[in-house]
Amino acid sequence: MDHDDDLSMQPKVDVNCSEAVHVLYHFLDGELTPERRLLIEYHLDACHPCLEAFEFEVELRELIKHRCREQVPDDLRLRIKDLLASEASGPGTNDGGGTFPPA
Ligand SMILES: [Zn+2]
């Protein structure tokens, strides 16, 4: 028998790494469907490199947010607030994901 070792028995994740990283930005912007977000969250839970990339991006955004706070015009700040609000009103994702420092 000269069958080659086919490792196709690995658990299959619906989203692969490159796709996960690609949609991270959309994920952070709240532009994904709930189903899609769930897939990404599922992938991040199982894939540490992607999780690290995700957390880095989150930190970066937090940093930018604070840095800009004093220079951002009110209407833009409202838009960001709106964005955060729409993201917060999504399906239950309160697994300790985003911890915003008190204003
Ligand atoms: Zn990955």
Image (spheres, helix red, strand yellow):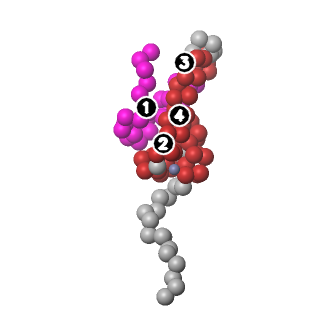
Q: Secondary structure at mark 1?
A: loop
Q: Secondary structure at mark 3?
A: helix
Q: Name the residue rendered at 49%, 58% in the picture.
A: 14
- Give the alpha-carbon distance from disc 3 to disc 4, as whole Å: 15 Å
Q: Which residue position holds label 1?
A: 98
7 relative position to 18: left or right = left
10 Å crowding of disc 2: few (<14), some (14-19), many (20+): some
Tell me where residue 31 appears, x and y as whole percent.
56, 41
Residue extent of the magenta highlight: 79-103
10 Å crowding of disc 1: few (<14), some (14-19), many (20+): few
Examine the rendered structure and indicate whether residue 74 appears above or below residue 54: above
Ranked by sequence position, the earlier of labels 3 and 2 is: 2
Q: What type is the residue that disc 2 sits on? A: Leu
- Whether residue 90 is in magenta: the answer is yes
- Give the alpha-carbon distance from disc 2 to disc 4, as whole Å: 8 Å
Q: What type is the residue that disc 4 sits on? A: Phe
In the image, is the residue at mark 2 within 8 Å of ligand 1 by its beta carbon? yes
Quarter-wise, where is residue 57 in the image? top right
In the image, is the residue at mark 1 within 8 Å of ligand 1 by its beta carbon? no
Residue 66 is labelled as: 3
Q: Which residue position holds label 4?
A: 56
- Give the alpha-carbon distance from disc 4 to disc 1, as whole Å: 12 Å
- Give the alpha-carbon distance from disc 3 to disc 2, as whole Å: 23 Å
- Whether residue 100 is in magenta: the answer is yes
- Give the alpha-carbon distance from disc 1 to disc 3, as whole Å: 15 Å
Ranked by sequence position, the earlier of labels 3 and 4 is: 4
Residue 23 is labelled as: none
Q: Name the residue rendered at 44%, 39% in the picture.
A: 90
Residue 51 is labelled as: 2
